[in-house]
Image: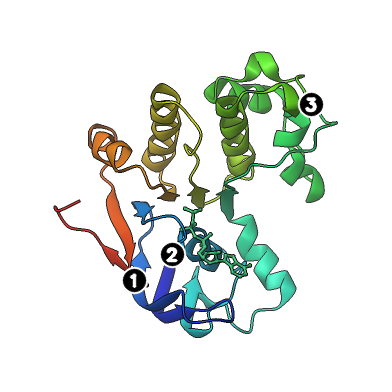
Amino acid sequence: MIAFENVAYSYGGGELLSEISLKLAPGSFHFLTGPSGAGKSTFLKLCYAELLPTAGHVTIFDREVKGLSRDEVADIRRRIGVVHQDCRFLDHLPLAANVTLPLTVSDREVSNDDLGDLLSWVGLRHLADALPPSLSGGERQRAALARAVIMDPEIILADEPTGNLDWDMSMRLLQLLAELNRMGKTIVMATHDLNLIRQSKTMVAARVLRIRNRRVQLAGADL
Ligand SMILES: Nc1ncnc2c1ncn2[C@@H]1O[C@H](COP(=O)(O)OP(=O)(O)OP(=O)(O)O)[C@@H](O)[C@H]1O
């Protein structure tokens, strides 16, 4: 689904990520871990062609991202749901309208039943009319997840979705991602929380990618 071949990325100084070669198979679940500033968000941005590699090749859905037109990148992005670290919303629009925004901008619609089901799934149906500033951190993250999945993407990339959440809410969010994975979605979740990764074993058969010394590698049992 996503393949990196000898990829490097630099924001202009030295290389932040180097010599990355890996494949994310359809239906896989990967955690992405590493210290703050290691390049987790950068790696995810390479996975949805927000950034282009400064060396090497990134292939998404069998398409090499370098050289794609803007429309082709947009096509790829429609098949990938992203939960951003800071989950921004339009504060003047109710939660339901924020969640359906990706459909609205691509001129598509969702039935009230389907939207209701989606909001129930993330436990936010009762807050459909609430404005984003009144939501808690956990509610915002679940709303961001609902917004990321409303286009029925094949891949979901979540950037520290549990960053500011307490343990119970982190587990709830992880459970939602595990359910999406069981439905066949390919998931990458960035987190620095090794406890959460250890705890996930009962929910999902996940592999762990670790960023260390600019490389992204599969972690072993020493995690
Ligand atoms: N647009 C940018 N221009 C220049 N440097 C950047 C840019 N974005 C990120 N960086 C730098 O690249 C490094 C990696 O950032 P990135 O956000 O990918 O790390 P991260 O592992 O996700 O960190 P965190 O866990 O703190 O979110 C950091 O040193 C950051 O300051």
Task: Quarter of the image for the N terminus: give it.
Answer: bottom left
Residue under pointer 2: 1
Observer able to see residue 108:
yes
Would you name the residue on which mark 3 appears? 94
If you read the primary sequence from the N terminus, does the residue marked by circle 3 or circle 1 appear first? Answer: 1
Query: Which residue is more in the foreground, 203 or 212?
Result: 212
Position of residue 96 measured from the top left corner of the image (x, y, whole percent): 73, 28
At label 1, the amino acid type is Leu
Coloured how? Answer: rainbow
Is 183 on the left or on the right of 105, as rendered? left
Give the mark nearer the N terminus: 2 vs 3: 2
Occupied quadrant, residue 49: bottom right
**Would residue 107 be seen by someone viewing this image from the given angle?**
no
Amino acid type at image mark 2: Met
Mark-to-mark CA distance, 2 and 3: 34 Å
Residues at discs 3 and 1 in contact (Cβ within 8 Å): no
